[in-house]
Image (spheres, rainbow, N blue to C red):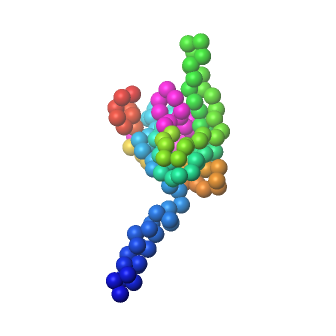
Amino acid sequence: MRLSAFIPVVLLATQPALADPAPISVMSAWVRAGPPSLSVYAGYMVLQNNSDKELTVVGVSSQRFAKVEMHKTEIENGIARMVKKSGLVIGPHSVLKFEPGGLHFMLLEPNAPLKLDERIPVRLEFANGQSMNTELVVRATSPDNKE
Ligand SMILES: [Cu+2]
């Protein structure tokens, strides 16, 4: 009798984890504000893979922009240039950081000027066919106010 009463509790405890479709946490997601005429914005976020499997980000899109690309800023002979990336791997229980001076989202041609504190919807596509909706907040400075 005690055993049968215990089983439903175990099932309830494990179900939410099994039902989670995209085991990713999003932190520090923001896009840098600019003048109303700006047509190219840079967005950043930290993605944490909470699963035991490698995950690869293969694409990003937003209904607010004509196009979103993944770029990496690299310094070559003292000159910074941006390299387009197509597949970014997040190892099991690891983080992938999009941050100023490194990896970033390049958001091109907004359908209207961005407003401060606006939440910009973005959709991340993964190599395994999963996708995930999240948001970037329009800010003048980074969430930790470092840059
Ligand atoms: Cu760029």
Question: Would you place residue 84 above or below residue 8 in this image?
Answer: above
The answer to whether residue 122 shows anywhere in this view is no
Residue 113 lies in the magenta stretch:
yes
- Whole-percent x, y for residue 50 in the image: 48, 51
Question: Would you place residue 76 above or below residue 36 in this image?
Answer: above
Residue at 41% in and 41% down: 28
- Whole-percent x, y for residue 33 in the image: 44, 35
- Whole-percent x, y for residue 8 in the image: 40, 78
72 relative position to 119: left or right? right
Report the label total. 0
- Whole-percent x, y for residue 134 in the image: 49, 51
Residue at 57% in and 15% down: 79
The answer to whether residue 116 shows anywhere in this view is yes
Question: Would you place residue 130 above or below residue 43 in this image?
Answer: below
Between residue 11 and residue 142, name the one nearer to us.
Answer: 11
Between residue 91 and residue 62, name the one nearer to us.
Answer: 91
User: Which span of residues is magenta-colored?
Assistant: 97-116
Question: Would you place residue 1 above or below residue 118 in this image?
Answer: below
Between residue 133 and residue 58, name the one nearer to us.
Answer: 58
Residue at 36% in and 37% down: 143
Would you identify the image quadrant in which residue 71 lies?
Answer: top right
Which quadrant holds the C terminus?
Answer: top left
102 relative position to 147: left or right? right
Residue at 35% in and 87% down: 1
Most distant residue in the top direction = 77
Residue 107 lies in the magenta stretch:
yes
